[in-house]
Image (cartoon, rainbow, N blue to C red):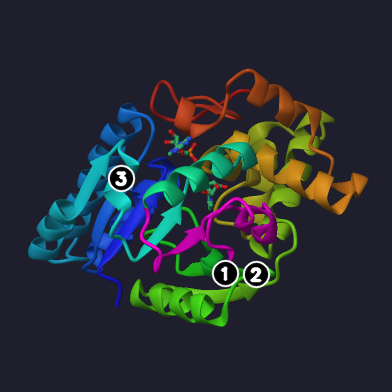
Amino acid sequence: MVGKVGVVGAGQMGHGVAQVCAVNGMSVVLVDVQQSALNQATALIEQHLDRLAERGVVDQSTSTAAKKAIVTTTDFAEIADCEVVVETAAEDEEIKRKVFARIAEHLNEEAWIGTNTSSISITRLATASDRPDRFIGMHFMNPAPAMKLVEVIRGLQTSEETFEKCTAFAASLHKTVAVAEDFPAFIVNRILAPMINEAVYTLYEGVGSVTGIDNAMKLGANHPLGPLELADFIGLDTCLAIMQVLYNDLADSKYRPCPLLVKYVEAGWLGRKTGRGFYDYSSGAPVPTR
Ligand code: NAD
């Protein structure tokens, strides 16, 4: 069992992954370049762990121990003695390449790296690390503590030993593994992201309103969340980044990102994380923007 985990990138996914590791008895170093992201991550983790203890999902001692097990820092040197680092920085290849260079400066040689990328080639990202054979795709779903699945994706260079370590680590976090080949967006987002993009086209072309589209898919297709609510939850920047990877790497025009999605991202309307996306969250209850 893994004793110490590094999580790099303390946004929506990073704080959730850190929480899952800590609840399962591991020490966690959570790293971000922004102190504000670390502060927000700490507040969210504490809030979630308190709620889990109140509901009896975890006992009070586990919740208290998990809070203590997470150290947050802007200093990459603190990941030095981790056995594994999960990279959860933004879905941007340039950012991820810089993160892998920083990790290489400090991480001990035996450790392996799992990237939480939603779409980018693991084979290509591995070339930006100092250990392509100990590099693998480990794609947690959002929210990481609640969602059962982890997609595991081997790059061309990934060793069998790293694959075994990654699947054992996922099992120790009580996650079910789906193995995907290294094709753009893997399994979940190859299917999910084009559906969301199509929902944005449906809005863009005036086929339905925001609530019309979401209600139609909830009541008509039995989806727990409408596609536009889901897009706001994922982050519109992440949705767009995934579509751009699909469009560029598969060179197929059927994946072209909807211009309305591009505009929302250009406006900084990224969904829940910025308080506005297809819904406005500023007054509490979500209000549709179209
Ligand atoms: P986010 O925008 O919430 O968080 C990204 C974090 O990365 C931010 O806190 C940012 O400060 C940090 N960061 C940026 N540059 C950094 C650097 N150089 N070093 C360290 N940290 C840095 O994004 P997110 O939604 O948490 O997504 C993170 C990753 O997880 C992406 O690869 C994304 O595709 C993937 N993912 C997202 C979801 C989702 O639903 N949002 C689901 C599964 C996987």
Is residue 190 something that shows in the picture? Answer: yes
Is residue 290 something that shows in the picture? Answer: no
The answer to whether residue 217 is above or below residue 213 is below
> Residue 34 lies in magenta, yes or no?
no
The CA distance from mark 2 to mark 3 is: 26 Å
The yes-or-no answer for disc 3 within 8 Å of ligand 1 is no
Residue 234 appears at what percent x and percent y? 54, 43
Magenta highlight range? 107-132
Position of the C terminus by quadrant: top right
Crowding at dot 2, Cα within 10 Å, few <14 / some 14-19 / many 20+, comes out as some
Please give the label number shown on residue 157. Answer: 2
In this image, 246 relative to 176: left or right?
right
Residue ID at (21%, 68%): 25
The CA distance from mark 2 to mark 1 is: 5 Å
Residue ID at (53%, 62%): 131
Does the residue at mark 2 contact the one at mark 1 (Cβ under 8 Å)?
yes
Residue ID at (13%, 53%): 68
Q: Quadrant of residue 64?
A: bottom left
In this image, 144 relative to 39: left or right?
right
Residue at image mark 1: 133
Amino acid at the residue labelled 2: Gln
Q: Tag 2's secondary structure?
A: loop
Q: Residue furthest left?
A: 61
The CA distance from mark 1 to mark 3 is: 22 Å
In this image, 162 relative to 29: left or right?
right
Please give the label number shown on residue 77. Answer: 3
Q: In which quarter of the image is residue 204?
A: top right
Residue 9 appears at what percent x and percent y? 42, 43
In this image, 13 relative to 219: left or right?
left
Amino acid at the residue labelled 1: Asp
Residue ID at (35%, 47%): 15
